[in-house]
């Protein structure tokens, strides 16, 4: 009995010793504890190969007032600028920023194979800082459109463009934030923030994910000083899709309109109106004869929800209203004189420079 027990103990000790040596030499044989993160690529060259051929260089010329002229007579000089554009359709449609082509006397596109073309401007949307161009150069390499709504903070992204005339430049970073607004860069702001380097000439270029899919159009970098670095912004591709579709159909972007002027509520204003929580925007004015006026909305009303979506800010309401079409029924839940109410606004067509 004792010999059998001794043999068993000896076998256990030898087995443990052998297992220790195996794990010491081959630690990868240990079973994983918890979910193993997906392997990251050692190189993003494949993503660049898939997307970079769709990124074109843009060269524009403008006549600008020459401030150096000493004469009383107004003089102008030619200003040449670098930028980028992205081929989104093999038939020759390209997207770039509105500010790239605004007031340009001449626009030239250099494709990735070196060909030069003068594009037709199909349409622009100043309020999202987007422009749609077209060249007739036969079938072209188009980028694969991804999904900006699926982006997560920390996702790897690549910025591809023509910074300072340095063609086919690629920088790498991560998504630093999504849904950025209040930057005074455009009327409708919903930017992707990234630390991938975006410089002069990157405007209109591609922001792609690790698979080489377009997730944004690079548009701006926060004004740089000695304490600012790595804060760039791109227009999300989901917004780009909608603008491009409207320009193709109508030559412009048609947006809904309610005829009102709202503002965010302060904590004191909420308490004075007996409101709890953080929802609601205040109607500063309601335009006489407009859709909101016809629906019975009044100055000093509070809008709590639009189409059953709780409203937390003026910016959120702006994006919702802009996403409607003329003739749409827009459900409003409001608050007036300490009581809730509901009404329906029939959206009109938004006039220029009046977001609501």
Image (cartoon, grey):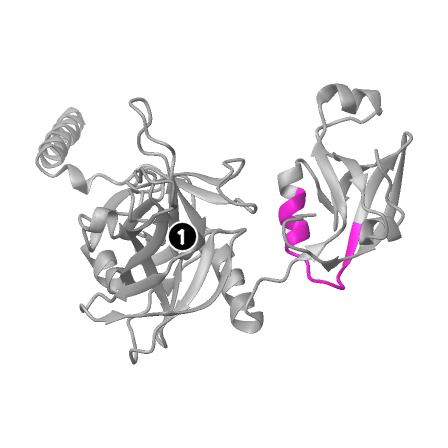
The residue at the far front in this view is 72
Quadrant location, the N terminus: top left
| Residue pictured at 63% horizontal, 62% vertical | 254
Q: Residue 68 at x, y = what percent?
A: 30, 38
Q: Is residue 114 left or right of residue 74?
A: left
Which residue does the image show at 74% across and 40% down from the upper left? 261
**Magenta region includes residue 329:** yes
Q: Nearer the viewer, residue 72 or 352?
A: 72
156 to 135, vertically: above or below: above
Measuring from the top left, give residue 28's x and y in whole percent.
Answer: 17, 41
Residue 324, magenta (yes or no):
yes
Which residue in the rendered view is the most extreme toward the bottom?
A: 138
Residue at the spot 76% in from the left edge and 51% down from the top edge = 258
Is 114 on the left or on the right of 259, as rendered?
A: left
Where does residue 2 sit, x and y in percent of width and height? Answer: 16, 24
Residue for badge 1: 216
- Helix, strand or loop status at disc 1: strand
**Residue 36 rendering spot, x and y as whole percentages:** 31, 42
- Give, as a single range, the part of the protein colored magenta: 317-331
Quarter of the rendering containing residue 233: top left
Foreground pick, 303 / 290: 290
> Is residue 44 at least partly visible in the picture?
no
């Amino acid at each position: 009995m004792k010999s059998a027990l001794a043999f068993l103990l000896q076998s256990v000790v030898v087995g443990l010793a052998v297992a220790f040596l195996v794990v010491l030499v081959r630690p990868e044989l240990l079973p994983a504890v918890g979910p193993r993160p997906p392997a990251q690529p050692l190189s993003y060259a494949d993503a660049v190969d898939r997307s970079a051929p769709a990124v074109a260089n843009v060269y524009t010329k403008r006549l600008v007032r020459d401030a150096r002229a000493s004469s009383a007579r107004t003089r102008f000089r030619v200003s040449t600028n670098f930028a980028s554009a992205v081929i989104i359709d093999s038939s020759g449609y390209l997207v770039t920023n509105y500010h790239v082509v605004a007031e340009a006397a001449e626009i030239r596109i250099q494709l990735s194979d070196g060909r030069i073309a003068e594009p037709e401007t199909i349409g622009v949307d100043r309020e999202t800082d987007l422009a749609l161009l077209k060249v007739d150069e036969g079938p072209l390499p188009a980028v694969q459109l991804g999904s900006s709504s699926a982006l997560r903070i920390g996702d790897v992204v690549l910025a591809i463009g023509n910074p300072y005339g340095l063609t086919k430049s690629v920088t790498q970073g991560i998504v630093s934030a999504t849904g950025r607004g209040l930057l005074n860069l455009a009327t409708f702001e919903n930017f992707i923030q990234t630390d991938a380097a975006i410089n002069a000439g990157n405007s209109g270029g591609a922001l792609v994910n690790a698979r080489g899919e377009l997730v944004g159009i690079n548009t701006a970098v926060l004004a740089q000083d000695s304490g600012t670095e790595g804060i760039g912004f791109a227009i999300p591709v989901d917004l780009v899709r909608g603008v491009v579709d409207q320009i193709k159909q109508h030559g412009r972007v048609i947006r809904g309109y309610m005829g009102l002027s709202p503002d965010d509520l302060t904590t004191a204003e909420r308490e004075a109106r007996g409101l709890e929580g953080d929802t609601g925007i205040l109607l500063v004015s309601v335009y006489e004869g407009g859709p909101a006026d016809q629906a019975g909305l009044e100055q000093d009303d509070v809008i709590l929800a639009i189409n059953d979506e709780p409203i937390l800010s003026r910016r959120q309401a702006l994006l919702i209203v802009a996403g409607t079409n003329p003739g749409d029924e827009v459900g409003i839940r409001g608050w007036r004189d300490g009581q809730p109410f509901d009404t329906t606004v029939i959206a009109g067509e938004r006039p220029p420079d009046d977001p609501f």
